[in-house]
Image (tube, helix red, strand yellow):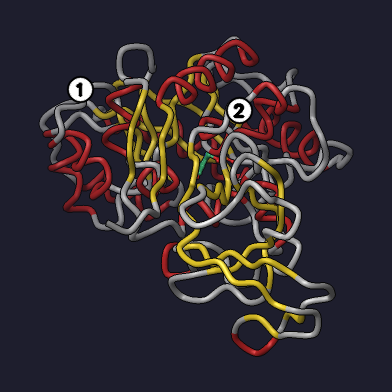
Amino acid sequence: MRPARALIDLQALRHNYQLARELSGARALAVIKADAYGHGAVRCAQALEAEADGFAVACIEEALELRAAGIKAPVLLLEGFFEADELALIVEHDFWFVVHSLWQLEAIEQARVAKPLTVWLKLDSGMHRVGLHPKDYAAAYQRLQASGKVAKIVLMSHFARADELECPRSAEQVAVFEAARQGLGAEVSLRNSPAVLGWPTVPSDWVRPGIMLYGATPFEEANAQAARLQPVMTLESKVICVRELPAGEPVGYGARFVTQRPSRIGVVALGYADGYPRHAPTGTPVLVAGQRSQLLGRVSMDMLCVDLTDVPQAGLGSTVELWGKNILASDVAQAAQSIPYQIFCNLRRVPLIYSGS
Ligand SMILES: *Cc1c(COP(=O)(O)O)cnc(C)c1O
């Protein structure tokens, strides 16, 4: 059997969820969209369900997968409905959903709904992706109330630059939010992971941690709170071939690496078809037989090469950690000019092996 696999530590997931709660003092929706950032949404939801205040996913397809697996907790659809006829399923399964545009508000007004809805009304406070314009916000709130179809409204917005702790933009967004919600007596939700970790004074009844649940930092710089996170995923495989080369020999496609000294090269059964970033350069950290080493040459589809020259205890069959408890996914992402969000989401083909449930 091919030795590539991703070990998922559900105990670490629960630790990170508790940290989000502790740092915010708020209720927390665990964001498990995109198959829990590659960690497996159903298993992650099952591991958190006893303590989680609820979950958030991108769309109804992801939410239905949770219900089909028996998850009873609240589930928020972060993009709301894409077509008005999803409202029937939303009602049937008691989903909560975001209203980010006036066309969704109009669709609710037109719809016949059998049960009162829970709506998270989204303001565009400055990211300029989705969300209602500040001038429309209070009126939209009143219209939802007047529709008679809504049991509860939560006021929400989303930060564009919360990962930049020196940047004034997040405070500006909070000010826009505060002005727009004047006089609307409802619960609020603004904070994603960087804001949970780095913006303690932002008002919150609800927080929406995603990447931090999986133990990766959203920041480029070191951060004391982020250092308390525990990595959840360990991506590993094994050395399947060892070769000794003199100095001056090319390794891999395009001869992008040439040995500088007599070298031992380990070939690892893991490549970009598994989601390892193809643009990770020579020098990207890996852990081989418990010792830090580096990637050499271009990443292939199913294999990549690592330096064993200074790891004498490593050989055929040695375990290689590509990211996990020792090699941080955020460091690999940075080397490959990506972000941990993307390298987790890109994971595929490798089996997910769970522990700590
Ligand atoms: C994805 C998402 C989150 C989670 O963001 P992280 O940076 O992963 O914590 C929170 N809120 C909304 C609206 C999202 O789309």
Q: Which residue is mark 1?
A: 72
Q: Residue at x 27, y 50 (%)?
A: 107
- Residue 20 percent coordinates (x, y): 57, 20
Q: Quadrant of residue 259?
A: bottom right
Give the percent coordinates (x, y) of residue 182: 64, 24
Expressed as whole percent of the image width and height from the top left, the position of residue 301 reads 46, 75
User: Mark 2 Cα within 10 Å, few/some/many (few <14, many 20+)?
Assistant: some
Q: Is residue 282 above or below residue 187?
A: below
> In the figure, residue 23 lies in which quadrant?
top right
Q: Earlier in the sequence, mark 2 or mark 1?
A: 1
Quadrant in the picture for the N terminus: bottom left
Q: Is residue 27 left or right of residue 116?
A: right
Q: Is mark 2 within 8 Å of ligand 1?
A: no
Q: What residue is drawn where x is 67% and y is 58%?
A: 308
Residue type marked 2: Arg
- The disc placed on residue 264 is none
The local crowd at label 1, few if under 14, some if 14 to 19, many if 20 or more residues have their Cα within 10 Å, is some
Judged from the image, the secondary structure of the residue bearing numbered disc 2 is loop
Q: Which residue is mark 2?
A: 181
Q: Give the residue at x 84% y 75%.
A: 260
Looking at the image, can residue 186 be seen? Answer: no
Q: Quadrant of the C terminus?
A: top left
Residue 305 showing in the rendered view: yes
For badge 1, the amino acid type reads Lys
